[in-house]
Image: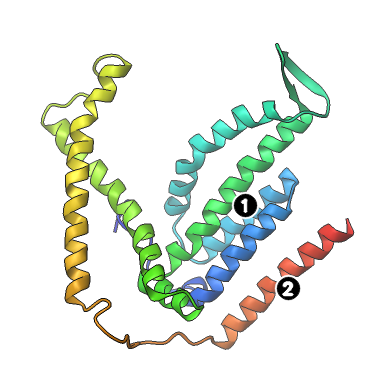
Amino acid sequence: MSIAVDLYVPAASWLHDLDPRVKLFGAVAGSAAAFLLADPLALLIGLAAVIAVLRLGRVPARHVGWALRGLLPLTILILLIQPWFVVGGQEIVALGPARLTTDGLRAGLVIAIRANVLALLALLPLFTTRHDDIVRGLVQLGLPYSWGLTLTLALRYIPVAAGLYTTIQHAQEARGLDLRRGGLIGRVRQFVPILTALVIASIRLSDQLAMAMAVRGLNAGPRTERRVLVMARADWLAAGLIGLGLVALIALRVVV
């Protein structure tokens, strides 16, 4: 299945076999560690570690590359703008009142790399866990079922909306729509037929989803579980290692 349609990558790996709650805990702990780290090199090592975990978990390189390419515009924007808002360090360039300093460059690198780390950590459970298992994990952690279902559907239909947009764009271009014609205003207007069709398709999709959920008896009575998640020894070991790593990093920051 295309990346634009579904983020989940079916595979037989240790990462796929982990309990969804462990992967969610790992993503949260990794995000906390990313905020604790303020050194570009340490964050770069952390980014490489997350990519290594994904690859060792048999997530294809094209999926990782797709995520990083999607973050590239944001990364470039951060690197171009953020350094000018931090003072301190040795001055490199001065453009009027704006000053580019070594501390500014360092801060820009930290934020840009951290954004990539956080994005890959958020995608790690989605790449390696079925959506219904994510809901089960969130519910067994205490989240109301309706909230967990809403969150999962939102995450699930973001790539679906992207796939719809691409399909509609190709269909409109096949009918003669030229998105490169005209100036800036003209090009913006060229997207009106695509966005109109996207809104209509999204409304139809939401109506079909509502009907499917009603047919399955959502909120019609007490819920029963067909399958309950159970933590295995490997899950407890992984959760313990993640927790110890986070505690060690916090202790290191306090000492240093």
The quarter of the picture where the N terminus appears is: bottom left
Q: Residue furthest left?
A: 175
Q: In this view, does 33 lie to the left or right of 215?
A: right
Which residue is painted at 18% across and 48% down in the image? 201
Residue 47 tag number: 1
Query: Toward which corner of the image does residue 223 lie, by quadrant?
Result: bottom left
Q: What residue type is labelled 2?
A: Leu
- Alpha carbon separation for disc pair 2 and 1: 19 Å
Q: In this view, does 150 lie to the left or right of 113?
A: left
Of label 2 and label 1, which has the lower sequence position? 1
Q: Is mark 1 on a helix, strand or loop?
A: helix
Decide: is 50 above or below 16: above
The quarter of the picture where the C terminus appears is: bottom right
The answer to which of 122 and 234 lies nearer the viewer is: 122
- From the top left corner, tell me how far across and down residue 72 is, in percent: 50, 38
The answer to which of 65 and 121 lies nearer the viewer is: 121
Q: Is residue 190 visible?
A: yes
Q: Is residue 3 visible?
A: no
- From the top left corner, tell me how far across and down residue 70 is, in percent: 45, 42
Q: Residue furthest right?
A: 255
Circles 2 and 1, Cβ within 8 Å, touching? The answer is: no
- From the top left corner, tell me how far across and down residue 128 is, in percent: 44, 67
Residue 176 tag number: none
Decide: is 7 above or below 103: below
- From the top left corner, tell me how far across and down residue 11 is, in percent: 40, 70
Decide: is 96 above or below 43: above
Q: Name the residue under label 2.
A: 244
Which residue is painted at 73% across and 36% down in the image? 106
Which residue is painted at 55% across and 31% down in the image? 77
Query: What is the basis of the colouring in this image?
Result: rainbow
Q: Which amino acid does label 1 sit on?
A: Leu
